[in-house]
Amino acid sequence: MDQPIAVSNLDDLTSWNSEWSDLAVVVLGLGATGFSAADTLVELRSNVLVIADTAADNRVQMTQVIGAALTLGGSADEQCAALAAHSPDVVIVSPGYPLNHPLLEWCRNAGVAMWTEIELAWRLRDKTGKPAEWIAITGTNGKTTTAQLTAHILTTAGFRAGAVGNIGIPVLDAIRYPDGFDFLVVELSSFQLHGMPRTGVGAISPLASVCLNLADDHLDWHGSREAYANAKATVYANTKVAAVYNRAVLATQLMVEEADVTEGCRAIGFGLDTPGPSDFGIVSDLLAERAFHDDRHNEAIELFTLDELRHRNLAAPHMLANILAASALTRAAGISVEALRAGVASFEVDAHRNQQVLVSGGVTWIDDSKATNTHAASAALSAVDPVVWIVGGLLKGADIAPLIQQHATRLRAAIVIGTEKLAILTAFERHAPQIPVFEVESADTEHVMPRVVEIAHGIAREGDTVLLAPAAASMDQFTSYADRGERFAAAVRERVGGSDDDTTDAPAATPASE
């Protein structure tokens, strides 16, 4: 195999104004991030080849329009041959490519640099002049809501801020936005973090960062809990002002203690207990801060009351944690307490995250289809009692038994969907045999949720909550968690009919990576 010859010192590529022309680049994947990377590099006059297994027709057409070469489909050997023929100086890898993928193996064997789109965006962040400050957010659960809330608070305070990254908007699109941003709130998945360097010119240096929590997820991709946690810990590297951690999750504190941060960076804790100095937490019925004010060693500043958050459906424990984390991140960015309060007061939770569909006959129907892992489902279950739980889908290697053991006393019944039912049914039989369990057998997506709602409607009693919190990804039976949630809500409205209490009908959300 011929070794590619680099035409440029990659360490010199640290600015939009660096010499990117004639650089040979291969972009792996033609999803949103892959196309954004190709489009950006063509604009920089690099020589770009995109290799992808499949792609939407419109992206194929747009790739041809911008002038990038494209290899679509083919065997692994054929794709490797196309990669070798291009003699790349660097390869941009879209999130989720398996670590043992033949194309990545080829790059490692050939000594070709592999970057994520996040590293590329960091190098190019000065396109519109002064680079935006980055706020980096990861975690097993809650990162999209926290990123949205953080960006909303900053925007309400008068700054130009955008929530980007794993949330659905490629960072490369944001750094090319003509008017620029003051802050980019970057949601980072474990896939993205795995490929990011912690040192060197391509390593990001966020103003503030947080790992919200840590629970088993994507273990089939990472290979082990340790590898997954190590990827998440990358979020703290080179943080400048505040490394924010969850006091209830020791692993996040250890990540901060072991992180190589910028001198002067502070560790800021958040939790649902009483805050100490440099913490955010809860005192009696108040969310409070003891981190960014002069007398933090002696007193706390009131941020919000639990009552006002309850009135806005923001008082579930996991939502309180998200609010405290976003408060810490924005206060680290210099936002006043008054601006913080105004931002939270006007925030609306995204669709499919603990979203009330309707209340009828004393039964509350909740769509938390975005609970795609056991940690998210546990947070949703902790907020309701008793509950008819709709569970199942693609488990991604997670063990669901501890979740069932933890919440068995809350359950009126369980309704199991998805293609990986056996593990769930077995866990119920072993750990909660007293719980009625109903299995929905259907290969037809159209009929899954109508049958689920039919069963739930017959089980639920006044005072119950019917909760869609599947603890699993959706792509076995649905196109996305949003599709799953929308079909559930439509079936509820069709079967249950008009509500005799308040209803909520929010627009559909664009799903991020599950």
Image: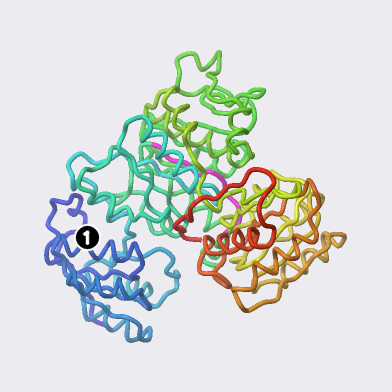
Task: Verify whether residue 215 appears in magenta.
Answer: yes
At 33% from the left edge and 40% from the top edge, which residue is drawn? 161
Where is residue 180, by image quadrant? top left
Query: In the image, what residue occupies the spot 59% across and 66% down?
Result: 396
State the predominant SS element of the stretch in magenta.
Answer: loop
Q: Nearer the viewer, residue 100 or 321?
A: 321
The magenta region covers 208-217
Mark 1, Cα crowd under 10 Å, few <14 / some 14-19 / many 20+, is many
Q: Give the amino acid at mark 1.
A: Thr
Q: Quadrant of residue 137?
A: top left
For the residue pair 271 and 1, the one nearer the viewer reads as 271
Residue at which label 1 appears: 40
The extreme right residue here reads: 434
Report if residue 39 lies within the magenta region. Answer: no
Secondary structure beneath disc 1?
helix
* In this picture, residue 70 sits left or right of residue 231: left
Residue at x 20% of width, y 39% of height: 130
Q: Position of residue 32 (x, y in %)?
A: 35, 63
145 to the left or right of 31: right
**Residue 241 picture location, percent across and down:** 38, 32
